[in-house]
Image (spheres, coloured by chain):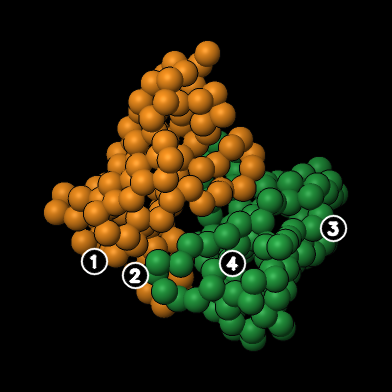
Amino acid sequence: RKEVEQDPGPFNVPEGATVAFNCTYSNSASQSFFWYRQDCRKEPKLLMSVYSSGNEDGRFTAQLNRASQYISLLIRDSKLSDSATYLCVVPRPSNTGKLIFGQGTTLQVKP
Amino acid sequence: NAGVTQTPKFRILKIGQSMTLQCTQDMNHNYMYWYRQDPGMGLKLIYYSVGAGITDKGEVPNGYNVSRSTTEDFPLRLELAAPSQTSVYFCASKRDRQSNQPQHFGDGTRLSIL
């Protein structure tokens, strides 16, 4: 099992749609998780941090299921500007602060 | 509120040349990282530092060197540029070792070796 696994997509959705991405992780001891957004050839930008069962920020909701070891990202009312690659990121269990990146899920929102 | 600043933004090098990619952060973060990202691929860790004077290798350190003489700066050195080092390079920083602290990325240096 990969340390962090995502469906690479691409997900092609119309504007206004609701779309959900899943991410599974292998280390049951992981406590914190992140969703980053990366536009083509740009830097990854932090979208949401996920600590407990989940959190919400406007149109974006992240949920954590520790028993099944997966994190999800829900985007409601998709905008054209949401088109990007979404990275599921899990801190590596060490003192180094290193991260384990999923391969990313590509979202294309169409008019 | 600059965050993580990388220079230059773009650079073209000839095979065998050397250069230093600069990275500085103004957030007083202890932890800093260098990644490379090839087209269509994920991020690969080159080197990292957990504080001034401390550096360590990541997944792909060959052909690179780093130093960390101050908390703010973490330059990446390419000594003998090779075409395989054509990539986008990202620097990132993190406040401390706590797992709930995210990494913050600079906007990258796009490097081509011809």
Pinpoint residue B16: horizontal percent, then vertical percent.
82, 56
Please identify the residue farthest to the bottom as the structure is shown: B53
Residue sitting at 56 percent across and 48 percent down? A44
Q: Which residue is mark 2?
A: A93
- CB atoms at circles 2 and 3 under 8 Å apart? no
- CB atoms at circles 3 and 1 under 8 Å apart? no
Rendered image: mark on residue B93: 4
Relative to A57, say whether B97 is above or below: below
Q: Chain of mark 4?
A: B
Mark 3 crowdedness (10 Å alpha carbons): few <14, some 14-19, many ≥20: few
Tag count: 4
Left or right: where does residue B88 sit relative to residue B103? right
The hue in which chain B appears in the rendered picture of the protein: green
Relative to A34, say whether B68 is above or below: below
Rendered image: mark on residue A29: 1
Q: Chain of mark 1?
A: A
Residue sitting at 52 percent across and 13 percent down? A111
Q: Which residue is mark 3?
A: B17
* Mark 2 or 3, closer to the camera: 2
One can see residue A111 in this view: yes
Q: What is the secondary structure assignment of the residue under circle 3?
A: loop
Pinpoint residue A14: horizontal percent, then vertical percent.
44, 16
Q: CA distance from mark 4 to mark 1?
A: 24 Å
Give the amino acid at mark 1: Ala
Same-chain status of marks 1 and 2? yes
Pinpoint residue B68: horizontal percent, then vertical percent.
68, 79
